């Protein structure tokens, strides 16, 4: 693991310089004039960075006293370095929070290499969007519905070995008996989409519906792709007729394994703090999040930027979900780990 020396030094400075009187302050006193930091486990310009900067811009309007929120990108090791830094080194006073993808809710449970945090112990503030992944096929493919993927092989493009478009279709093959054939090596979802147009692959095993709406709305309008399976715990309100992966489970045991694997989609774009943030400050941050996610000015701004705000999840609900996932029976956890193992 390559740690960010700059951030380790800054975190140490925060710890040394933190005033001892801070613990006696009310949330109003603590946040007054405060310059906060929002760490992002992704590179600048990507989707998570856009959501982070959107959140940072609006937060001071709902957390009175905060002067500004500085966004810092720490994409090393797919965001794991940021999550480890937040968990171990960052000040636990509410001044430093983070934004990452939902996979961190089960990273330590699935024994992801390099994860040095316990998801249950993070201070969960809220999730801006419940991401719904879609397994899709190109319109010329013989696979046009969820039922077809059990009887016909579908060649799908994938990126890195730990990416959702690789892990998820392979997991469905192992648990449900689907017939995805994953071809890895593509750099982005955009390159997979181009390969679909060229006839190089027939689809992709996981593509955020919000990304399809933003990047390829004409493909939805013109029927260029078939939406096969929703990779989520519940159906997206805009796609009521496509089954979720949970609905395709053969047994209750399979359903439990799939829920454990795909719950990260429900916690799609979380905002969270390190463990140990004082409860009154955590509640203040959660209240600010709830107010922001229901504010019409904020929602209109999200629409202008084509940022989907779908079923935002309060921090208390995330904490409850994470605790429930980590309390799953050992047999289900073991099967989930086996189903999501790398294939390279």
Image (spheres, helix red, strand yellow):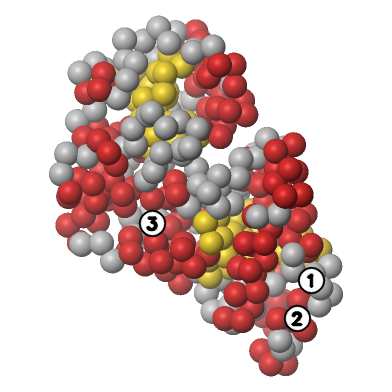
Determine the secondary structure under disc 2: helix
Determine the secondary structure under disc 3: loop
- Note whether 131 is above or below 329 in the view shown: above
How far apart are labels 1 and 2 at the CA level? 7 Å
Between residue 288 and residue 181, name the one nearer to us. 288
> Percent x, y for residue 128?
59, 52
Q: Dot 2 surroundings within 10 Å: few (below 14), some, or many (20 or more)?
A: some
Q: Are marks 1 and 2 in contact (CB under 8 Å)?
A: yes
Q: Is residue 101 left or right of residue 142?
A: right
Q: Earlier in the sequence, mark 1 or mark 2?
A: 2
Q: Quadrant of the C terminus?
A: top left
Q: Dot 3 surroundings within 10 Å: few (below 14), some, or many (20 or more)?
A: many
Residue 243 got which mark?
none
> Percent x, y for residue 53?
72, 50
Q: Are marks 3 and 1 in contact (CB under 8 Å)?
A: no
How far apart are labels 3 and 2 at the CA level? 33 Å
User: Quarter-wise, where is residue 111 in the image?
Assistant: bottom left
- Note whether 41 is above or below 289 in the view shown: above
Q: Which residue is mark 2?
A: 28
Q: Which residue is mark 3?
A: 106
* Residue at the (49%, 12%) spot, across then down: 224
Residue 64 got which mark?
1
């Amino acid at each position: 693991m390559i740690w960010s020396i700059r951030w380790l030094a800054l975190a140490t400075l925060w710890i040394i310089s933190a005033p001892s009187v801070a613990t006696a302050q009310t949330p109003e006193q603590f946040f007054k004039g405060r310059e906060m930091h929002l760490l992002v486990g992704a590179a600048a310009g990507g989707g998570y960075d856009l959501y982070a900067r959107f959140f940072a811009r609006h937060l001071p309007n709902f957390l009175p006293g905060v002067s500004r929120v500085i966004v810092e990108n720490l994409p090393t090791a797919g965001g794991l370095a940021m999550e480890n830094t937040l968990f171990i080194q960052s000040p636990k006073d509410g001044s430093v929070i983070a934004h990452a993808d939902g996979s961190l809710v089960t990273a330590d449970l699935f024994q992801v290499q390099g994860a040095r945090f316990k998801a249950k112990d993070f201070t969960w503030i809220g999730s801006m969007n419940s991401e719904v992944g879609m397994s899709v096929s190109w319109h010329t493919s013989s696979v046009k519905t969820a039922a077809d993927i059990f009887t016909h092989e579908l060649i799908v493009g994938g990126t890195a070995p730990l990416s959702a478009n690789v892990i998820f279709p392979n997991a469905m093959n192992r648990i449900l008996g689907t017939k995805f054939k994953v071809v890895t090596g593509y750099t982005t979802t955009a390159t997979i989409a181009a390969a679909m147009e060229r006839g190089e692959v027939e689809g992709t095993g996981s593509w955020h519906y919000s990304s399809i709406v933003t990047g390829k709305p004409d493909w939805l309008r013109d029927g260029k792709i078939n939406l096969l399976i929703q990779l989520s715990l519940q159906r997206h309100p805009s796609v009521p007729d496509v089954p979720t992966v949970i609905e395709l489970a053969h047994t209750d045991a399979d359903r439990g394994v799939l829920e454990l694997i795909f719950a990260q989609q429900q916690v799609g774009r979380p905002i969270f703090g390190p463990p140990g943030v004082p409860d009154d400050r955590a509640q203040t941050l959660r209240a600010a999040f709830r107010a922001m996610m229901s504010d019409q000015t904020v929602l209109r701004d999200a629409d202008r930027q084509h940022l989907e705000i779908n079923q935002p999840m309060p921090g208390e609900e995330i904490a409850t979900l994470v605790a429930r996932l980590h309390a799953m029976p050992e047999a289900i956890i073991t099967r989930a780990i086996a189903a999501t193992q790398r294939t390279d």
